[in-house]
Amino acid sequence: MAHPLNRNFQNLFQVARWSLLILPVALLVGSFNAFFLWLLSEATQARIANPWLIYLLPVAGLAIVYSYRNWGKNSAGGNNLIMDEIHQAGEGVPVRMGPLVLFTTVITHLFGGSAGREGTAVQIGGATTDWLSKVFKLSEDDRKMMLTAGVAAGFASIFGTPFTGAIFALEVLFIGRIKFNAIIPALLAAILANVVASAWGAHHTHYLINFDQVSTLFGHAVDIDLLLMAKVIIAAIGFGIAGYLFGELTHGFKDLFNATLKNPYLIVVVGGLMVIIITQLLGNYDYIGIGVYPSRDGGVSITSAFTEGGAEWYSWILKLVLTAITLAAGYKGGEVTPLFFVGATLGNFLGWVMGAPVDLFAALGFLAVFAAATNTPLACTIMGVELFGAEYLPYFALACYTAYYFSGHTGIYSSQRVAVSKTLEHGRDHDGLNKIGSYREHNSSSLKHLANKLTKKDK
């Protein structure tokens, strides 16, 4: 048997090769996402300054649907298309996906849709790297690694979290399994794309936890407050259920729209009208758009959720419903930032109810709802360190993994595959071929069941 160190020269060559291949990935994806963040900021400010723009949301939706139906090819597959291509080569990721999703996401935000930005950034990364794979004439295996690096670069440059981006790109492919074969390309792409985006002046939001932990046990200082840990577990169960509801409600609305309205143009108009009506009934614009910063004095946002009284008890429900309607109706954007909003505001409420630090629980909800909905607890734990610091790492990990277990075999990405069952018992492993979407077909939600009933009546 050959000595394991005999491959070191070959490994060194591969690292050098991938370093060169990743340079154009980082330059292009980091630059595109910096441009996207700038456009998104401008669109958000324009909407806040001109609140009447929300009344044009249905018209904007028509333009979005028309664009995808006439020029999108298979771009409508979005993040799921990229995941499918990493698992098994198909028709490829069209280069038009990048600019198309970029501008349609900006349109969604300009006219008041409730959506995020991660999906757009990942699709920009996927479209760019698939095009580069063809330019470089890479093998199929290298192309898959390149696509994974594109996902990492997109995620890292949009949130300013390079290590999270690299792990997310690997972890999101399978539930319960991480293949580290693409870790070097993913890590290089994430770090360098974030550097490029920052060099262009891309702004990433900074969050602060002011809670200062001082715990003692038997008269000695300890790192963990056991009572607080119990509260974290209880809250994390709620975060897991919220993540489950987010995914199921989005898919459920989509099923319901397709069963009742059928025509995509009619669906996007009705979805836009629903967002307008709900917003007008609320009397404010807190729950549309990106939601990172408040749009008015005393408004609810992700950043406000880190302070006492910074969210209402129902804030997370409103954001969840409005985002589910927006995305299910056909408007474009990501799910992750709305998940941050849902989690942070739910954490604010649960922290107040349990007499726990509101800022810490907002951070835990921020991370754990995301972990539950995307089935990426490790990436979300690392994100906690990158965004909030390592001091609260045990709580981040406990919240993210508990929420992950309590969200079930569901998620926002239908093409995510199940490799290991979510169970604390000695469960069987899966073959990694079944998608989450197939599990939904066997375990229909109430909206899915209603949609099936309506479809049968039509027949």
Image (cartoon, rainbow, N blue to C red):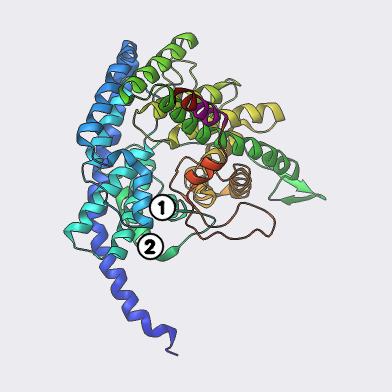
Q: Position of residue 180 (x, y in %)?
A: 44, 63
> Can I make out residue 191 in this image?
no
> Can I make out residue 425 in this image?
yes
Q: Residue furthest bottom?
A: 1
Q: Amino acid at mark 1?
A: Ala
Look at the numbered disc 2 and give the secondary structure of its residue.
helix
Numbered range of the magenta stretch: 446-453
Horizontal placement of 99 versus 175: left or right?
A: left
Residue appearing at x 41%, y 47% in the figure: 161
Q: Amino acid at mark 2?
A: Ala
Residue appearing at x 43%, y 22% in the figure: 260
Q: Position of residue 131 (x, y in %)?
A: 21, 52
Q: Are marks 1 and 2 in contact (CB under 8 Å)?
A: yes
The residue that mark 2 highlights is 182
The label number, if any, that marks residue 169 in the structure image: 1
Image quadrant where one finds the C terminus = top left
Residue appearing at x 68%, y 33% in the figure: 356
Residue appearing at x 43%, y 29% in the figure: 254
Magenta stretch contains residue 452: yes
Of residues 203 and 175, the one nearer the viewer is: 175
Q: Position of residue 299 (x, y in %)?
A: 48, 18
The answer for how far apart the CA atoms under marks 1 and 2 are is: 9 Å
First in sequence: mark 1 or mark 2?
Answer: 1
Of residues 439 and 223, the one nearer the viewer is: 439
Mostly what secondary structure, the magenta segment?
A: helix
Horizontal placement of 227 versus 375: left or right?
A: right
Corner quadrant of residue 348: top right
Look at the numbered disc 1 and give the secondary structure of its residue.
helix
Q: Residue furthest left?
A: 135
Image quadrant where one finds the N terminus = bottom left
Q: Is residue 200 above or below residue 453?
A: below
Q: Is residue 33 above or below residue 419?
A: above
